[in-house]
Amino acid sequence: MNSETILIRQIHPSFIQDGRVGSNAFCPTSKDEGKLSTYDGDKIEVEDAWQHYTIDLRHESAGAYGISVGECESLDLSVSEDPEPFPEHVLVDFNPHGSSAVKKKGKKLRKFAVDRGWLYQA
């Protein structure tokens, strides 16, 4: 990975309201232990990531957005490979930040992603 690497984020349909993805799609939930799960776009194609997520892992996804490693790092969010669940798995770590900062950073990641546009839609 490098700063240009696109991290593929699957978007659960519940994160979409009135046709817009919410910033909560870019914030870890309580079960995520403070880390946002993504795919390494250098290691897997977007459609293949979507199929892995929806078919192999049996999760729902309306599609995928992308954020770059550099965008995460610009917000003081570290990015690390986490190949234990699957080889292309990458985590964005929000742990050093309080809940208010997590929400602000999620909004900024959402903006980066929306400005880039959908990478894949179901």
Image: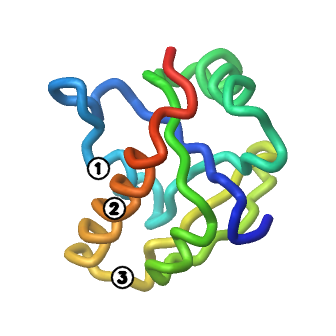
Q: Residue at x 60, y 44 (%)?
A: 8
Q: In the orientation shown, which residue stands out farthest toward the left?
A: 18
Q: Position of residue 29 (x, y in %)?
A: 36, 53
Q: Position of residue 78 (x, y in %)?
A: 59, 77
The mark closer to the camera, 2 or 3, is 2
Dividing the picture into quarters, in which one does residue 112 lie? bottom left
Q: Count the marks: how many?
A: 3
Q: Amino acid at mark 3?
A: His
Q: Is residue 62 left or right of residue 120?
A: left
Q: Which mark is residue 24?
A: 1
State how far apart marks 3 and 1 are (Cα): 16 Å
Decide: is 42 above or below 108.
Answer: above
Q: Is residue 99 left or right of residue 46?
A: left
Q: Secondary structure at mark 3?
A: loop
Q: Is residue 65 left or right of residue 79?
A: left
Choose between 86 and 103: the one closer to the eye.
Answer: 103
State how far apart marks 2 and 3 are (Cα): 11 Å
Which residue has dot 3 on it?
A: 97
Q: Earlier in the sequence, mark 3 or mark 1?
A: 1
Q: Residue at x 48, y 46 (%)?
A: 116
Dividing the picture into quarters, in which one does residue 52 lie? top right
Decide: is 86 above or below 110.
Answer: above
Q: Amino acid at mark 2?
A: Gly
Image quadrant where one finds the N terminus: bottom right
State how far apart marks 2 and 1 are (Cα): 7 Å
Dividing the picture into quarters, in which one does residue 106 lie? bottom left
Q: Earlier in the sequence, mark 2 or mark 1?
A: 1
Q: Earlier in the sequence, mark 2 or mark 3?
A: 3
Q: Secondary structure at mark 1?
A: helix
Q: Residue at x 50, y 20 (%)?
A: 121
Q: Residue at x 44, y 73 (%)?
A: 94
Which residue has dot 2 on it?
A: 106
